Image (spheres, helix red, strand yellow):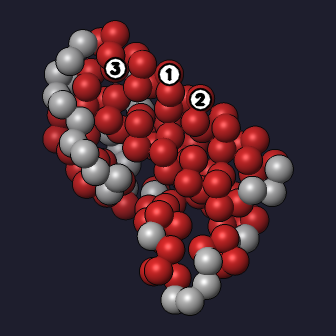
Amino acid sequence: MTKKEAGIWFKQAKYDLETAKELLANKRFLWAIYTAGQAVEKLLKGVLVKKGKIPPRTHDLEFLTKEVKKSEKVKIEKKNFLELKNLYNRIRYPLLTNEQAPFEKIYQKDAEKCLSQAKSIFSKIKN
């Protein structure tokens, strides 16, 4: 893995974060959360690629954060992404929401919180 490849991960992560902001503004709350989760996932995988590692095939933000912290000094605590992690997983797997489609249980405040957590993670990682 090369720095150029890491740059592609970072570029896509930033694009996804900007897209999440637009989705929030357009009241597409579920997709704003999903895209914010994708942005963080790509950012974390970019850090791993930058360190010469092959990014794992997982969507688990907590696992990816732990992997990044093994090789990078970043101050990301579980509280920095807990809501994002929980909702990102819930909307990926519709049956976890107990007989309702995930979008029926996602509100603006949820999307705002998740986007705030995603921005916080971006601010803690220099790429």
Side of 83 where 100 appears, left or right: right
Residue shown at 27%/21% (left/top)?
A: 50
* Residue 117 in the image, given as x and y percentages of width and height: 55, 53
Residue shown at 73%/47% (left/top)?
A: 23
Earlier residue among tags 3 and 1? 3
Q: CA distance from mark 1 to mark 2?
A: 6 Å
Q: Amino acid at mark 1?
A: Lys
Secondary structure under the numbered disc 2 in the rendered image: helix
Q: Quadrant of the N terminus?
A: top left
Which residue is identified by label 3? Answer: 6
* Residue 43 in the image, given as x and y percentages of width and height: 41, 35
Residue 108 seen by the camera: yes
Secondary structure under the numbered disc 1 in the rendered image: helix
Which residue is identified by label 1? Answer: 11
Q: Amino acid at mark 3?
A: Ala
Q: CA distance from mark 2 to mark 3?
A: 14 Å
Do callouts 1 and 2 mark residues in contact (Cβ within 8 Å)?
yes
Residue 86 seen by the camera: no
